[in-house]
Image: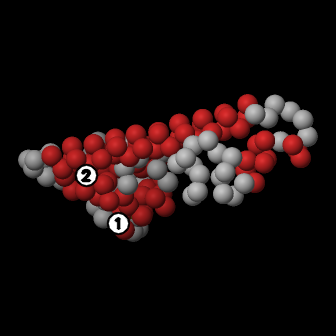
Amino acid sequence: MSETLSIGDLARATGVKPTTIRWYEQEGWLPPPARTEGGHRAYGAAHLRRLGFIRHARELGFASEAIRALLDLADHPDADCSAAHALATAQIREIDARLSRLTALRAELERMATSCEGGVVGECRIIETLADFEHGHCADPLHRGR
């Protein structure tokens, strides 16, 4: 790609909003683009690739600090990649923890829903359970007492 892209073109090509692209520039995640004679940003292929990298890392759930570290690693292709491995395995552990919490939440909601299959709201087990701020009706001990 030898031509340049406007911020709008880059946004359309990557699915990233122009305001987000500008924020990435401010944070140093994207290098400053060249400017046209009129002062407009002019992005190149390197910006497109780097923005794709950032977007992919975001989609995988990496936190900002991890993305910054991964970008730094990507800028040093001859460096040891053990830090990238550590970041990826930490993200896997975070996803596993989230999945565990979501599984427990799903089970709790299913338990609530099966205990109330109609009737009047005053006798609704779902409403009763949600209204119990101490979570005494909840089956999952991790969910109780928060």
What percent of the width, then of the height, locates residue 139?
61, 41
Could you give the CA–CA distance between mark 2 and mark 1, rounded to whole angstroms? 14 Å
How packed mark 2 is, by other alpha carbons closer than 10 Å (few <14, some 14-19, many 20 or more), is: many
Question: Which mark, by number, is residue 15?
Answer: none
Front position among marks 2 and 1: 2
Going 25% across and 56% down the picture, which residue do you hit?
A: 69
**Label 1 sits on residue:** 27
* In the image: residue 112, left or right of residue 36: right
**Label 2 sits on residue:** 70
Quarter containing the N terminus: top left
How packed mark 1 is, by other alpha carbons closer than 10 Å (few <14, some 14-19, many 20 or more), is: few
Three-letter amino acid code of the residue under disc 2: Leu
Going 49% across and 54% down the picture, which residue do you hit?
A: 17
Task: Inspect this view and state whether residue 145 appears.
Answer: yes
What percent of the width, then of the height, locates residue 44?
30, 51
Taking depth in this image into account, of 104 and 23 the one nearest to the observer is 104
Image coloring type: secondary structure
What percent of the width, then of the height, locates residue 54?
35, 50
Is residue 18 depicted above or below 84 in this figure? below
